[in-house]
Structures are given as structure tokens and as C-alpha cells.
Image (cartoon, grey):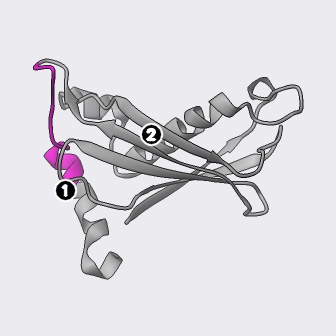
Amino acid sequence: MYTSTTQIRVRYGETDQMGYLYYGNYALYYEVGRAEAIRTLGYTYREVEEMGVMMPVVELNSQYLRPALYDDLITVKTSLKELPTDSKVLFHSELYNEKGILLNKGITTLVFYDPKHKTKVNMPEELLNRLAPYFTKENL
């Protein structure tokens, strides 16, 4: 399993009138987590796109357990529980407050897409090679 964490402070403009992180902004926090998870592997989204692959979101599921509040420092834990074997990749996200309490969890499904040929493709080999060591028997 591959896991990455990053932190985001809830900004005032991201909250509703109750001071809660607006529900639609959780997807943005998932996005930050995914981008940083890829960056931790040594790539940026831009570099993946330069490999000729786009990664559109095709499904998003989110479970709201407790609210994130204005000025909370949120830890976004992003995991790949399975090594992608085809065009689909599932990012599992968990958001925790500073006390380590789980606030939200979700799964974002993306596909690897070749915009030139307008077709789904497998994960770029370079990225697959970076992820593979996290899925050996010793790391599972």
C-alpha cells in the first residue's frame, strides 16, 4: 500500500456560515492530497501529463463524519490500496483534525486517458515502477 500525507489549514473563505468547511471543498482537499502523493513519488501532475496521459475523475464518493472547522489544521492521508493493473486508479482519502480524529473519508476514481487518441490507457510505466515497491509482500 502506498500512503502519503499532507496538511491544509481550513481558510475562512472555504467555510459556510457555521464556520464548517463547505461540503464541496472536501473534493479540493482530496485533489491536494492526490497531487502531493504523486509529487512524493517524484512527479507532478504536469509531468504525468507531459508523458501523454491525463487523469480525469470519473467517480467520487465522500463520507462526512464530523465537520472540519475554520482554522483547523487538517491532515489529508491519501492511499493507494491496490497497484493499478489497468486504466483505473482509486485514491482513498482520509481527513483528520489536529487531535487525530477522522472527519471525512472518500474514494476518488480516476482513469489514465490519452487525449491524443481519445482512449483509456494503462498507468505510465515510469509511475508504475515507482509504485511497485510499495506493493511487495513485505510492504503489504
The answer to which of 63 and 97 lies nearer the viewer is 63
Q: Which mark is residue 129?
A: 1
Q: Are marks 2 and 1 in contact (CB under 8 Å)?
A: no
The answer to which of 77 and 107 lies nearer the viewer is 107
Seen as rendered, the residue at the extreme left is 117
123 falls in the magenta region: yes
Q: Residue 34, image x and y in percent?
A: 45, 43
Q: Residue 93, image x and y in percent?
A: 53, 51
Q: Residue 5, image x and y in percent?
A: 54, 55
| Secondary structure type for disc 2 | helix
Which residue is located at x 36 percent, y 32 percent? 58
Please name the amino acid that badge 1 sits on. Answer: Asn
Q: Which residues are magenta?
A: 117-128
Which residue is located at x 10 percent, y 20 percent? 117
Q: CA distance from mark 2 to mark 1?
A: 18 Å
| Secondary structure type for disc 1 | helix
Which residue is located at x 31 percent, y 32 percent? 55
The reply, left or right, for residue 11 in relation to residue 136 is right
Q: Is residue 65 above or below residue 115?
A: below
Which residue corresponds to mark 2? 35
Please name the amino acid that badge 2 sits on. Answer: Ala
